Image: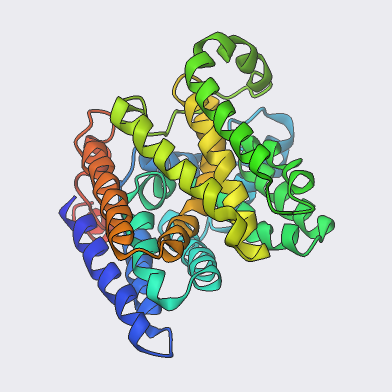
Amino acid sequence: MLVTIFLGILSTFFAYISKFNDSRWGIRITFFLIYLFLALRFNFGNDYEWYQISFDSISGLTISDFLNTLLPYEPGYVILNWIFRDAGFFLMTAFLAIFNCIIYYKFISKHLPRNLYWLAIIIYIFQPSFLLLQSSAMRQSISIMLFIFSTQFIQKREFIKYLICIILAILFHYTAFFLLPIYFFFYKNDKLSDFSKVLFFIIYISLFLLSSSISPYFKILVGVFSEKYEYYQNAAVTNSGLGFLYYSFLFILTLYFEKSQSDENRLLFKISIISFLIIPLALIIDMTGRIGMYFSPATIVVFPLIFKEIKNKYGKFLFASVLILLTLFQFFQFMFSDNYMPYFFHYKTIFSSILFR
């Protein structure tokens, strides 16, 4: 935990000083530090050991084995393991770390001004759903990054390129299937009407109130997936009264400030709206927690943009304080939880693996 906290403080510092220079060397140092953290990690995360074991298992398979055997891995992930079977699992992990850092660096630097990088980095590192859980959920993290990359094609109305990205995402994690119709939802990307915003918030509240009643029907929909995906959301804080107020507060601000955004950023606000609507369902339905992980990264950009839009200095301070404090609360709650503490609390590097082998 201390290593993660140190990473967060140092990365935020370098992201913050980016505002004082025309170049982006500050944010580049930030992502270099994040890269080292991700590339050198060993047995960090609740799925790490499983992925390391599966790498050895997949590396020994032949094409015939793959064609004739029902494997518990998506084909894209199998091919990735085959590519790195001579280089080794550690080098594959380092390669995925590069992919991760490039995608999030481009994402943040494209949509935010330099003076807001620091807030995005705080959210990215300390909100457990992003850096920490995606470092563990290696297959889905690839799919998530492909979806983040594909959002530019929604904006440009390039359906074929979007479709290619999503098909690739499905090859790494079957839950990406739900992303196929997203293009058509956001194709026009017009400003939301006031009626639509009120309707979205009513749906959000209703899902909290009726989630237990509709869950059996939704489980039938997600039952097309054979694998029982693990639930990765931090439900404890969301399911509390404080969590409900916190997310409702953020949702209202997201709905309100959607109208003042550029076309590119408005798309991210709409994607964030989907992530809010998934939160109530994710409390009781495992699969929706995984689906929500595709949409929630948009908030890494959306929340700093909300901060930018608030003109009153006291309002800015209040918003930033609530956002940072609750993000840190979720971080510590996650780190000290029985489910995740054994896997994320102590950070180890590949050098410890080599040294004590």
- Residue found at x 23% / y 42%: 329
Q: Out of 105 and 71, give the one closest to the viewer.
A: 105
Please say if 305 is above or below 129. below
Q: Position of residue 327 (x, y in %)?
A: 30, 47
- Residue found at x 28% / y 60%: 314
Q: Position of residue 85 (x, y in %)?
A: 53, 54
Q: Position of residue 343 (x, y in %)?
A: 27, 39
Q: Out of 188 and 70, give the one closest to the viewer.
A: 188
Is residue 122 found left or right of 325 in the rendered image?
right
- Residue found at x 54% / y 32%: 278
Q: How many marks?
A: 0
> Does residue 58 appear in the picture of this structure?
no
Q: Out of 141 and 150, give the one closest to the viewer.
A: 150
Please say if 258 is above or below 196. below
Is residue 153 found left or right of 143 in the rendered image?
right
Is residue 97 found left or right of 265 in the rendered image?
left
Q: Position of residue 165 (x, y in %)?
A: 71, 54
Please say if 222 is above or below 143. above
Work out which residue is located at the far bottom of the displayed protein and give it. 22
> Does residue 155 appear in the picture of this structure?
yes
